Image: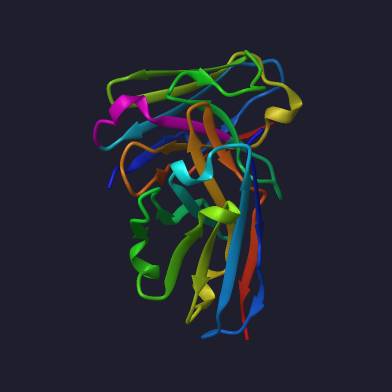
Amino acid sequence: EVQLVESGGGLVQPGGSLRLSCAASGFTFSSYDMHWVRQATGRGLEWVSAIASTDDTYYLGSVKGRFTISRENAKNSFFLQMNNLKVGDTAVYYCAVITSDGIYWGQGTLVTVSS
Amino acid sequence: EIVLTQSPGTLSLSPGERATLSCRASQSVGSSYLAWYRQKPGQAPRLLIYAASIRATGTPDRFSGSESGTDFTLTISRLEPEDFAVYYCQQYDRSPWTFGQGTKVEI
């Protein structure tokens, strides 16, 4: 069974940093592209970043240069380092993966950027 | 990027009625890489349909998906109380993933 578990969210001041983690199980992690998607309270879903199985990385324009995605295949985990956080980054952050039998999401971790 | 437009914004129906939700893509979605989700307040999105018409594991058969060119439809044959929620479509054909703005199904 595919499982994704996020951690690392919390309250941070504008300009601060957080590192989100996503622990994966139930599939061959190293073979799949992994994604981060966020949702601000009362708003829709917004794709944030992805890391391919080849380690190629992709970012939403508004986070480019501030967020860095990485993965550690030996630990079946991937990460989102978020620097210079802005109030507009406040959201629940989900990790997600597409496998041969569906699209799987974690339960999310809340990031709140506020002074 | 592929823009997805969902309609209507809100659908007011009663339990037992049929719901038809639409998602229109701004360009073709290759390999039918279109998914539908249901989201209840405070919960993560739950995958209902992927590849436009394949029910995800555990999705009741009252849910069905179809496509016609760049138009995609989610049909709920008979609404159950748990179906009153927000529904999103998503394309995962091209990066970046994009989502529709959502359709709220309310009583």
User: Quick one: quadrant of the C terminus of chain A?
Assistant: bottom right
Direction left: furthest residue: B27
Q: Is residue A43 visible?
A: no
x, y percentage for residue A75? 60, 55
**What colour scheme was applied to this rendering of the protein?**
rainbow
Direction right: furthest residue: B81
Residue in the foreground of this view, choosing between A50 and A75: A75
What residue sits 61% from the left and 41% below the top? B45
Q: Quadrant of residue B90?
A: top left
Q: How many marks?
A: 0
Up the image or down, B19 lies above or below A7; here it is above
Whether residue B31 appears in magenta in the rendering, the answer is yes
Residue in the foreground of this view, choosing between A50 and B74: A50
x, y percentage for residue B12? 61, 30
Q: Is residue A102 visible?
A: yes
What residue sits 66% from the left and 17% below the top? B60
Q: Which residues are magenta?
A: B27-37
x, y percentage for residue A21? 60, 62
Whether residue A16 appears in magenta in the rendering, the answer is no
User: Quick one: quadrant of the N terminus of chain A?
Assistant: top right
x, y percentage for residue B35? 47, 31
What residue sits 50% from the left and 50% below the top? A45
Q: Quadrant of residue A61?
A: bottom left
Residue in the foreground of this view, choosing between B41 and B13: B41
